[in-house]
Each structure stands twice: as structure tokens, then as C-alpha cells.
Image (cartoon, rainbow, N blue to C red):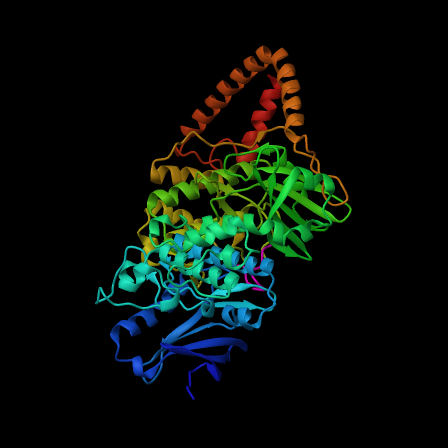
Amino acid sequence: MIELPGYKVGSLLGDGGMASVYRGTQLSLRRPVAIKVLKKNLLGHSEIRKRFERESLIIARLNHPNIISVIDQGIMEDGRPFFIMDYVKSINFKSAMERGGMTYSRALDIFIQIAKALAYAHKNKVIHCDIKPENILVDFEGFARVLDFGIAQIFEENDSDDEAFVMGSYRYMAPEQHESSARATEKSDIYSFGTMMYLFFTKRLPARNFPPPIEVNPDVSQALNQLILQCLETDPEARPNSADEIQHRLVSVSKDENFNDRQDNTNEDLKKAFKLLDVIKDESSGGVYLYEEQDTRSLLIMKKKSLDSPGFSASKKLAANEHPNIAKVVGASKTKRSFILILEYCPGGTLAERMAQGFDSSEFYSISQGIASAMVAAHAAGVVHGNLRPSNILFSDYGDVKLSDFALEEYRFYGDKSNRYRRQGEPDGKRADIFAAGVVFYQMLTGDLPEWKEGRLMRSRSFTKAPESIQLLIRKMLTLESEKRSITFTRVLKTLNDAYGGDQTQILSLSPKTPAIDLSSEDMTVARTLHTEIRSEEDASDAAHSREAKPAKTRRNVLVLVLLLSVLLALFSAQGYLLYTDTMFSTLEEALEFGRGLGAWL
């Protein structure tokens, strides 16, 4: 029996060709873990040992709910490397398939989760190289996790000493992997994924000249048949472009199989106006759903929260206004049982999904500038975020930053009680938002969460590579005492622009938009005539506006001139800085209030 300091090692969970996995307990936290140890007979094999040791590092850089996570790693007394993973009470996908009785809708849901994990890994330049049912864990709630990155590769890296070295599971390997592991790409994972789907729906592996799945199993739809065959193309370029594409196509396939029963309690008008495409989260406390609007084919996110959930007031405020870096709130309403939010769909994913890949200076500036710009506008409108973190920093299909989830309840990741983006005990407020943004900025620059020693921020080597002004900015944002954290997002935005040469003039505020739709049925009703109603309101507004255009324009021009003179006076103050705390206004809100009062006077 093996012994590891700090851990109690239990029974053998699995025994593969490269390593053994044991059940164990982390003594300090009394939590169950899985302990993976390299086999003794492979200690002398330099290539395998190198890949085993790198596996823990690869998984550690991947933070995704559908990928098993690494807790610790080390070397045993006999020289064998080991690492510690979360223990999940589950069975592997192969055993689940062999047991039988799994519905198509449940299987499709599992395949969608696997595709999400692969898409995340590929975005972070990691190829798994050994996708097969044995490397997928499925718990008893149907939640899937990918494991065993033992032979994974990093895009554009090839540290193998032997170009002809081949690792993987032969029956699931892509043709290019048979020649050399060095030839594996993300398209190789897609081939292996297709092999798993073919196996599930036909009960056989695809041998040479294999028949289409639909010929073996008539219950396979045409769309699913085409997807599986495309994944199994010999030419990598003929396979789907990405795991993201596979996920979206599987969602389309599964909507009839998987989601009709979940719409039973949904308002009939909503069913006609919108099609439910994906259930992203479905719990007793609320849910997140992806809908397609039938008339425009546009995608929307619906968030359903419990009636006592916070954030309704902030959501209504955001629904009446818009900003290019804040996810559009299409509608917000309370019903008899629920608090409903309708938001724009941001297909570019989250910042959390990109954290593992690192950011160059231009990427850091683009993202941090978008975050700061959104927060300037939100704070000026009296809205605090309260839960800013990478998972609610989204991206549009053009890569634009979009902040979401303003003032909603604090997010917890699978029961984790810690919150590294907020000081413990500090209430919601503008200074708490500054701290959260500082953590995000630090994480983007270093790949790690910040740590403090004796109240001082510890600066890693990667952190010190940033411009000195950015280092100083983040240190101020991460001041532990909130009363000393007096910096504003206006100052944050100016410092970012100064350091990276951005546009000094473009500080956008929230601007009024067409009134948001009112969701006011027992559960949720969205008018099918949403767009025509909005157009009618816009036409009426335009007609009224045209009658007042000339005097309004005159007042606006005078207001702009006076405000410009005020800003110039501030710029040439004694210290010469655009600091609201040192010039005529103590806060940005006071400056805006001055502008509103001046506008009313004019």
C-alpha cells in the first residue's frame, strides 16, 4: 500500500496502462480525493514520465465544470510522481453504456457536456489526444467530467523526443494519430468524439467501410447521422471546425428529444414566440435557458430567479438603458413566483473560459478597458455589480466585452464557500466592485489569483512585466482596507488608456433605449409582436423628437461647451491631473449631477 503525507490512501479505483488511481482522503480538510500514481515499471521511460508529470500541470490550467480538477501533486519516496484530483462518485461512460437503459436525450446531454469541455480545452490550446468512454465520468445526476489528460498536447508545442512516438487508444484514434502523436490536432479529438457517438447509437465501433449510423439504427435522425459521419471523416479538414460547432449542432438535434417535456409549464404564447434550445442550468432556485426568437432567429438568454432574489431594481435600470460593454437586458419583471430576466446571448463565451491561455498586452488592454468602461457607466447610473468575476464577463461574437449579472446573488461554484473576488465581510458597493476588478486584472496578467503577505500584495514575476502604472493601479485596487480603496473606475479607465495609448475621450455613459418588454404573466409572457411594438414606439418618439429638435439641439450644444470648459479647468488645476478628487468634483456622480443641473438651467 502506498503512503503519502497528508493523505490516507484507500482502495484501488482503477488500473490503467500508465497509472493506478486510488481513493483517498485529504486529512486536513477531511474530503475524499482520487490519487493518481505512475506505475513503477514506467519510471525508466522518460517520455511517459514526462507526460505523466505534465498531466497535472495541464489539468491545473483548465478550470471548467466538465473537466476533473487537480488539487495537489508531488513525488513519492520511491521517485514515482503522483497528483491528487477531486473524487467524484460516478461511473465511467463505458460502464454507463454497458448497463443499458440510457435514453437518447440523456446521452445527447452527456455528449453536449463533453463537447463543452473539449471546446474549452481547445480554446486554451490543449488537445486531449485520448477521448474515449473510459475517460468520461458520469455522476448519478447525469453530470459529465472529462479526465485523463495523461497524453494531452499543447498546440504549437512538440516536446516528444521521438517523432514516431504514438500514444492513445487505438480503437478511438484519428487516422493521423496512428502515424505519430505529434500529428494530433484538435480535429483528432473531434474524430475520437465521433467514434464515441457512433458506438453509443450503433452499439459497435466504426471499422473500415462502416455503414452510416442511420442504417444501423433507424432512430438516429438525419442531422445526427450527418454530424457523426462528418466527425469520422479521414481528412481532418473535412471534420467540423470546432467542438463549439459540435455542441451547437447537438443542441439543435436534442431540442425535440430532450426539451419538450421541460416546456410543459411554460406559457403557450412564449412557446409560439420562442423556441427553447438549451437548458444551461435548471435548479429549484432558478434556471438559465437559451431561446431562439422565431420571428428574427435571434438568440436570447432567460434567467429565472426566485422571487426574493436581489438584482431586480438594477436589472430594470439596465433594461431602460444600454452600453456597448454591458449585456443588453431585454426585459425584467417579477411574477407571482419568479423574477425573470431576458438578456442578449453572447456567443463568445466567458473570460473564465479564456483565463488559462494567458493574455498579451493588447488583449489585456482591450478586455480591461471594456470592463472599466462598463463599470464607469453602471456606477454613474447608481448600479453596483456586487459579483464581478470572470464567469460573468462575456464576449460577443465580435469579441467585445459584455458585463452581465449586475446585483444578482453571489455566485458559488459547486458548493465552494470561498469568494476570491470579494473581501470577506465587505458589503456590496463601488469599492467592492473595484476590488473584484483588481482581482480579475491581476489574474489576467499572471494566470493566478492574488495573494497577500502581512497586508501587502505579493507580486509575481509575470505581474512585474506589466507597465509600472498598471502595477500601481492594481495594487491600489487591491488595497485590503475598503476605506483606503478610494480609486474610481474613471481613474482606472484613464490609467489604462495612458498606459496603452487608448482613446482618452471615449467614456460612455448609459444611454436611454426603447422601453424594455414587460414580462408579467404567471410565469413569463413575451409578446410575439415585440419588434413591431418597439418600432411603433420608436416612430412615435421620433415624431415627438422632431418637433423639439432645434431648441433641444441648441441647449445641448451650449451644455457641451460649458462642460468642456469645466473639464479644461480641471485639467489645468494645480496638480495637472484629471482627478475628480483633486478638482472641482469629488466624484464622477457629482460631475454628472452638475451637468444635469446645468442642462436644466439652460
Residue 98 versus residue 496: which sits nearer the camera?
A: 98
Residue 67 visible in the snapshot: yes
**Quick check: 150 above or below 320?**
below
Q: Residue at x 37, y 44 (%)?
A: 363
Q: Residue at x 41, y 69 (%)?
A: 148
Give percent across and percent down for residue 385: 57, 46
Give percent across and percent down for residue 175: 32, 60
In reply to whether residue 411 is colored magenta, the answer given is: yes
Q: In this view, does 396 lie to the left or right of 523?
A: left
**Quick check: 541 above or below 474?**
above
Q: Quadrant of the C terminus?
A: top right
In the picture as drawn, the residue positioned furthest to the bottom comes out as: 1
Q: Quadrant of residue 334?
A: top right
Give percent across and percent down for residue 297: 57, 36
Q: Quadrant of the N terminus?
A: bottom left
Residue 484 visible in the snapshot: no
Q: Residue at x 51, y 73 (%)?
A: 87
Main secondary structure found in the magenta portion: loop
**Which span of residues is magenta-colored?**
410-420
Q: In this view, does 583 lie to the left or right of 339?
A: left
Residue 313 versus residue 61: which sits nearer the camera?
A: 61
